[in-house]
Amino acid sequence: MTFPLLTLSPQQPFWKFRTHRVIANTTESTRNLCKSTLYLFLALATPFIAYRCFNSSTMFWSSSSSSSQPATKIDADSLRRQRINSSKLYQPDASSKVPVIYSSYYDISFLGIEKLHPFDSSKWGRICRFLMSEGYLEKNSIVDPLEASTEDLLVVHTEAYLNSLKNSVNVARITEVPPVAMLPNWLVQMKVLYPFRRQVGGTVLAAKLAKDQGWAINVGGGFHHCSGDRGGGFCAYADISLCIHFAFVRLNISRVMIIDLDAHQGNGHERDFGNDERVYILDMYNPGIYPFDMTARNYINQKVEVMTGTTTDEYLKQLDKALAVAGSNFAPELIVYNAGTDILDGDPLGGLKVSPDGVIQRDEKVFRFARERNIPIVMVTSGGYMKTSARVIANSIINLSKKGLIETNVHSGRKIMI
Ligand SMILES: [Zn+2]
């Protein structure tokens, strides 16, 4: 930067000249000084201003998104409703059949890997074969459910959780079969997750059939360790939660009771409905085994803890008491009965000592509870890890039929009340 020198001119009085020039030169130099200062300021301040602008815009967006929380919630609710209403899982033609739901796709079997898990992964098919061979079910009267689509699953599950299943390592952890981690995910999807999704379709459909006909049995399902954002304990999808959300929207049901009598605590549906007063949870479980989910335990409305070694008589006595309390506490419009058979004596995971006949009596008590009160009941078979489980479940269904608590004979032209 340069400052102009003062020069003399003979036409002007010295004082005037001097004053003008000084003012002019001072003004010009001041202007230059200001300009230079401004450039310097801009050069130094631009990054800072840009940083502040970025931050404030971030703050603006984050504050506007948090201030629009209620709107987001409303959107999530209406999106869920929209997904449920556009789902194809409630098949209209299923209501003319006996409400026993099964697909040959339920059974998991490939390369012998299924044998690495104590779970009898073909028990679902074996139950149906027992029922058919003994004349309690006809093949063409069984309801074959659709696969739950991604849109169906998003009714309860987060997108992040569903994406996590695209990694075989995560599926291996959930199913507790480590070699699954080594398989390409397309194979895992086809051989493990597809059968599960089909079973989920079965549980969802069961609520509709139960509403129509008073009862429905999904020969599979009962993945009670899975919640919207996490799976575990052989449970990859939250079929019970999905079933209930569909019932809320499509069946005009507003009060549901979950009776969870699997040996394990049903932490999945407990986490999903923890603060939902429309759902009453009666969970009778062994607290000394998986999943030890203390947070989910706080969400159980009626907790009945049965200790390792509990025998048939003691178990059934506790169940009688529990059902009486549940019946006086809550008046449901639908019961979802998670009928795990891992309470059987000898089960390697359940730790209880209930006899096969005890399981049959248990199921009868729950069905009697529902049918005497005229409450539609959905039964899912859930855990049950021994080869004998299929036989016990089939015997139990036969007993329900013999006692008139369910009707498994096919009546052509049956009039269905919807
Ligand atoms: Zn279990």
Image (cartoon, rainbow, N blue to C red):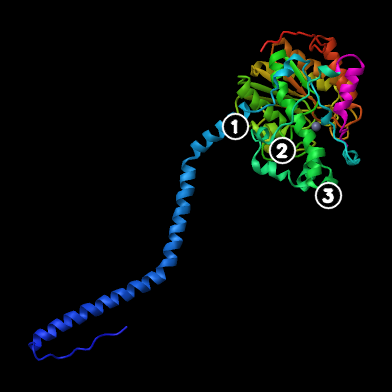
Q: Secondary structure at mark 3?
A: helix
Please tell me which residue is depicted at 64% across the width and 18% down the height of the picture: 330
Q: How would you rate the neighbour count of disc 1 (Cα within 10 Å): few for under 14, some for 14-19, many for 20 or more?
A: some
Q: Amino acid at mark 1?
A: Arg
Q: Is residue 62 above or below residue 217?
A: below
Is 223 left, or right, of 392 in this rendering? Answer: left
Q: Nearer the viewer, mark 1 or mark 2?
A: 1
Q: Is residue 97 above or below residue 389?
A: above
- Which badge, 1 or 2, is on the more N-terminal residue? 1
Is residue 163 located in the magenta-colored stretch of the structure? no
Q: How would you rate the neighbour count of disc 2 (Cα within 10 Å): few for under 14, some for 14-19, many for 20 or more?
A: some
- Nearest to the observer: residue 292 or residue 213: 213
Tell me where the magenta segment starts and ends, as one range.
118-138
Q: Where in the image, quadrant-wise, is ligand 1 located?
A: top right
Q: Amino acid at mark 2?
A: Asp
Is residue 123 located in the magenta-colored stretch of the structure? yes
Please tell me which residue is depicted at 46% across the width and 42% down the height of the picture: 67
- Which badge, 3 or 2, is on the more N-terminal residue? 3
Q: CA distance from mark 1 to mark 3?
A: 35 Å
Q: CA distance from mark 3 to mark 2?
A: 29 Å
The residue that disc 1 covers is: 80
The residue that disc 2 covers is: 293
Q: Amino acid at mark 3?
A: Met
- Residue 29, position as x, y percentages in the image: 25, 80
Residue 182: give its label: 3
Q: Secondary structure at mark 1?
A: helix
Q: Nearer the viewer, mark 3 or mark 2?
A: 3
Is 353 left, or right, of 83 in this rendering? Answer: right
Please tell me which residue is depicted at 75% across the width and 33% down the height of the picture: 197
- Which badge, 1 or 3, is on the more N-terminal residue? 1
Quadrant where the N terminus is found in the figure:
bottom left
Name which quarter of the figure residue 277 lies in: top right
